[in-house]
Image: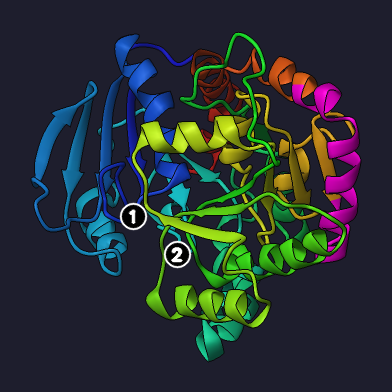
Amino acid sequence: MIAFPRRLLLLNWRDPWHPRSGGAELVTLRVLERLAARGWTIDWFSSHYNGAKAAEIRNGIHFLRAGSSATVHAHAFARYARRREHDIVIDQINTIPFLTPWYAAPSIAWFQQLAREVWLYEGGLMGRLGYAAEPIYLRPYRKSPLITISASSARSLRAIGLTGPIQILPMAVDEPPDVEVPVKSVPRDIVVVGRLTPSKRVEESIEAAALLRNVGWRGRLRVVGTGPAYYRKSLERRVAKLALTDVVVFHGRVDDDERRRLLRAASLLWMTSVREGWGLVVTEAARHGTPAVVYNVPGLCDAVNDKSTGFVVRNRPDALVAATCSIFHSFDLFSQRALDQSRPLSWDATAEAFADAISVLLPSAQRRRP
């Protein structure tokens, strides 16, 4: 174990209150606030944004901010290169790395997921360059100790040549589990939840809704989330083209209570992303007895226990439909298993696993001092 004082520095291009923060920042906050409560001293360095303070303490964590999402990496280097103020540096990599193996020690890289196919869906020409460059610009981490959040993400890290020791964290969610499976909407609604961006492939859920309607489904596809206006408009055009204006409901951004209501009422969650770190909303839905049908991509294939809490299917709308019909045929069984298997997950267990991971990986990190 790390001897006290346990002084941890986290580098992340965003903090949990950044306008574009997501699941990675939520997971990190839930872990680190628990370590802070145990007496760890934790600094979280990230980019600045409108309305944010340069420094503040929240949830027991010292938040420090400088630069933008594009320049925060340079600010981190200027502030922390060759300094020895912390027992461990956690380099959290969200697309662009901080390159701490070159200047901060001892450091551990934390990958929620690789970008990989996300580059191709969201970057145009730059995306194709990013896809090709990702294995190259991550070479400084090829022997670094690593933390990730799913077995499939670990395999992806190995596939691009990262050979250092890996520890995998179990995931959890804020959503409290229902005591029993709640009453679901009749006819059965399906929900899609997340940021509306091309890499989420929401258009394929819309295509699946059209196919499902053709075999007698009379529910609603409820799309929750926001994203770039051009992509939202493309989804609306597809809905109109398929004559689904009475089937697909765009809810936009909703508050936590409304999000919970939609997850509880839905009979099924669909996720068609090109990849995820885990897919926290799968577990959030399961807490309400809502099983999931997801594409067979990194992250999602771990979040669903195939043929038990839902289905992991080929990346095609017709596969979504076939699995959905199977679940609706045996809905009570799938929904109860989804609820039961999600119950034991807790942030306390995740935080404990994170502390254990640091203890296991620290010797490797110390041997790689720059």
Of the pair 329 and 153, the residue shown nearer to us: 329
Q: Residue at x 53, y 26 (%)?
A: 358
Q: Is mark 2 on a helix, strand or loop?
A: loop
Q: Is residue 146 visible?
A: no
With 249 as the anchor, is 305 left or right in this view? right
**Residue behind mark 2:** 96
Of the pair 283 and 12, the residue shown nearer to us: 283
Residue 298 is inside the magenta segment: no
Dominant SS in magenta: helix
Identity of the amino acid at label 2? Ile
**Which residues are drawn in magenta?**
313-335
With 312 as the anchor, is 3 left or right in this view? left
Residue 179 percent coordinates (x, y): 60, 8
User: Is the residue 222 above or below the residue 237 in the image?
Assistant: above
Residue 218 percent coordinates (x, y): 73, 52
Which mark identifies residue 34?
none
Q: Which residue is drawn at 82% across and 33% down?
A: 305
With 306 as the anchor, is 248 left or right in this view? left
Q: Residue at x 46, y 78 (%)?
A: 233
Residue 331 is inside the magenta segment: yes
Q: What is the distance, in whole Å, between disc 1 and disc 2 at their CAs?
A: 9 Å
Q: Residue at x 61, y 65 (%)?
A: 202
With 255 as the anchor, is 355 left or right in this view? right
Q: What element carries label 1?
A: loop
Q: Are marks 1 and 2 in contact (CB under 8 Å)?
A: yes
Of the pair 151 and 211, the residue shown nearer to us: 211
Of the pair 303 and 205, the residue shown nearer to us: 205
**Residue behind mark 1:** 13
Identity of the amino acid at label 1? Trp
Q: Can residue 317 be seen in this view?
A: yes
Residue 77 percent coordinates (x, y): 28, 57
